[in-house]
Image (tube, grey):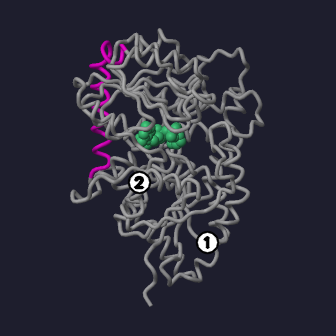
């Protein structure tokens, strides 16, 4: 009997930014003729289905399976409690994954045998399981290459006495222990976990160990491209020789989809409110500032009001995503006071969750006030939309430094959110520095487009990834 075709199991960390980029990869592998099973936790799968009822029908080539995260259904799985999720995945989901994969080799002739795994780069327990059962595995870190390299250099930062730093440390003090970033990186630009005062901080230690563990996989995937992060990719490849830079994935997938296929339904965990698209249709060209802080950011009520007053005082039109869980606090704490909502009625539009790629592609959008999440950063650059960056945590601090200082496709508003600064930054983005930022963003957008097009670096890196998956799968099947 012919051996089964390559069958890849794709396993993301159960969070929006991770699912989006890994589901885009799943679709690309499916287009390349590779069988894919996408593994979500029960909780995220149910949220995906609730927000996208046609999820399963829209992707016939991809099978969806679920696995327990062993948390109560009503556990918020919020930023503040993310370690509950991380700990439960490692303690309970890991043995469940092993049981799911055990015997895959014995079923090598059947079509449900997994012959290769692509696991989230912060779920390195999947690498341990894969190595135990003998299935080849590739790690996929969904954040930027610059943030990954900063985390990888964590031990060097500590050895160099550059971390941890005191409460009264000069946050603009230059960092010298991260090769390739000596000219522009400061204390405040390090990933947020480096601001902890205790070396044994659990979240920091978790990310540092996940980063080191990625080297136990057979290969390493990043959602970036050579023309954007080439210098950092060279440093990473010295430790991870098989690194596939295949992004921007949203643009790469679109390029590989045949014209006959409509744009894929979104993979949002919240239900998109498309009424904002109609509102945008009635706004002047490039007049609207899109405001969104991603899926994890939580702000205080005071910060909400500072952003609000800054927006209103700037007299700029704005479309603001206010997720139900954006504002820290209970009840109507998260709501905009009605008097403020009226103050900007005709200039402001609010939604709980937007069709972000469609919004960024709309001609009325002139700028993006973002938290600098990696997917949002890539999507904004590819749409040619300059950014104001107000990073919240993890990789976002270093992403925003690259946006403002290295790629020059936006303004870095890190660590500030008083209404006066918000107003001034908006005026700089939408008026003062508009031309130079749009020009610079267009240049990088073109480089991104070239990288995902046939013959481009990301296009070719993906072809190699698909070929390596096929050959690793064939080797696995032959050995069984
Ligand atoms: C976080 C980290 O910020 C990110 O760098 C890491 O790669 C994954 O974890 P998140 O905070 O969710 O991700 O931000 P981001 O990476 O920007 O992903 C958010 C995704 O949700 C984007 O693809 C964006 O298009 C989408 N989105 C956001 C919507 O579809 N609608 C919205 O209203 C807001």
Tell me: 477 left or right of 176: left
Residue at the image point whose x is 72% and y is 27% from the top = 164
Tell me: 302 left or right of 315: right
Residue at the image point whose x is 50% and y is 70% from the top = 472
Q: Nearer the viewer, residue 275 or 454?
A: 275
Secondary structure beneath label 2: helix
Tell me: 131 left or right of 56: right
- Asked whether 431 falls inside the magenta stretch, the response is yes
Residue at the image point whose x is 47% and y is 8% from the top = 420
Tell me if I can see residue 230 in this picture.
no
- Asked whether 354 falls inside the magenta stretch, the response is no
Secondary structure beneath label 1: helix
Expressed as whole percent of the image width and height from the top left, the position of residue 149 reads: 56, 40
Q: Nearer the viewer, residue 242 or 54?
A: 54
Query: What label sits on residue 231 in the rendered view?
Result: none
Q: Which residue is mark 2?
A: 24
In which quarter of the view is residue 311 placed? top left
> Compared with residue 75, is residue 289 higher up or lower down, i.e. above or below?
above
Quote the CA–CA distance across marks 2 and 1.
23 Å
Query: What label sits on residue 101 in the rendered view?
Result: 1
């Amino acid at each position: 009997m012919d051996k089964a075709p390559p069958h890849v199991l794709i396993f993301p960390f159960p969070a929006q930014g991770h699912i989006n980029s890994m589901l885009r990869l799943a679709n690309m592998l499916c287009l390349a003729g590779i069988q894919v099973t996408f593994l979500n936790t029960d909780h995220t799968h149910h949220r995906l289905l609730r927000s996208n009822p046609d999820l399963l029908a829209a992707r016939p080539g991809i099978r969806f399976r679920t696995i327990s995260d062993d948390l109560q259904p009503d556990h918020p799985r919020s930023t503040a409690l993310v370690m509950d999720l991380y700990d439960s995945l490692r303690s309970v989901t890991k043995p469940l994954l092993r049981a799911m994969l055990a015997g895959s080799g014995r079923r090598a002739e059947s079509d449900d045998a997994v012959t290769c795994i692509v696991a989230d780069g912060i779920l390195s327990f999947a690498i341990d399981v894969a190595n135990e059962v003998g299935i080849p595995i590739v790690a996929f870190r969904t954040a930027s290459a610059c943030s990954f390299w900063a985390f990888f250099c964590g031990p060097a930062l500590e050895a160099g006495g550059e971390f941890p730093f005191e409460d009264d440390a000069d946050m603009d003090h230059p960092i010298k222990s991260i090769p390739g970033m000596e000219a522009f990186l400061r204390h405040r630009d390090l990933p947020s976990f480096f601001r902890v005062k205790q070396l044994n901080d659990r979240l920091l230690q978790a990310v540092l160990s996940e980063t080191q563990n990625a080297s136990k996989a057979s290969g390493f995937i990043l959602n970036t491209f050579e023309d954007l992060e080439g210098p950092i990719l060279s440093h990473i490849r010295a430790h991870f020789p098989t690194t596939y830079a295949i992004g921007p994935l949203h643009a790469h997938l679109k390029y590989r989809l045949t014209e006959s296929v409509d744009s894929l339904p979104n993979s949002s965990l919240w239900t998109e409110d498309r009424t904002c698209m109609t509102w945008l249709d009635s706004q002047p060209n490039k007049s609207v500032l899109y405001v969104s802080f991603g899926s994890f950011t939580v702000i205080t009520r005071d910060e909400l009001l500072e952003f609000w007053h800054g927006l209103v005082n700037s007299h700029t039109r704005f479309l603001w995503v206010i997720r139900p869980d954006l504002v820290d606090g209970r009840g109507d704490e998260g709501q905009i006071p009605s008097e403020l909502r009226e103050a900007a009625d005709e200039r402001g539009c609010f939604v709980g969750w937007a069709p972000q790629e469609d919004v960024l592609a709309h001609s009325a959008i002139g700028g993006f006030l973002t938290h600098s999440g990696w997917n949002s950063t890539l999507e904004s650059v590819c749409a040619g939309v300059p950014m104001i960056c107000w990073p919240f945590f993890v990789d976002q601090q270093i992403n925003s430094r690259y946006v403002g200082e290295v790629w020059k496709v936006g303004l870095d508003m890190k660590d500030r959110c008083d209404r006066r600064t918000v107003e001034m930054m908006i005026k700089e983005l939408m008026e003062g520095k508009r031309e130079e930022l749009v020009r610079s963003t267009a240049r990088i957008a073109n480089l991104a487009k070239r990288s995902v097009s046939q013959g481009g670096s990301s296009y070719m890196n993906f072809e190699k990834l698909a070929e390596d998956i096929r050959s690793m799968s064939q080797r696995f099947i032959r050995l069984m």
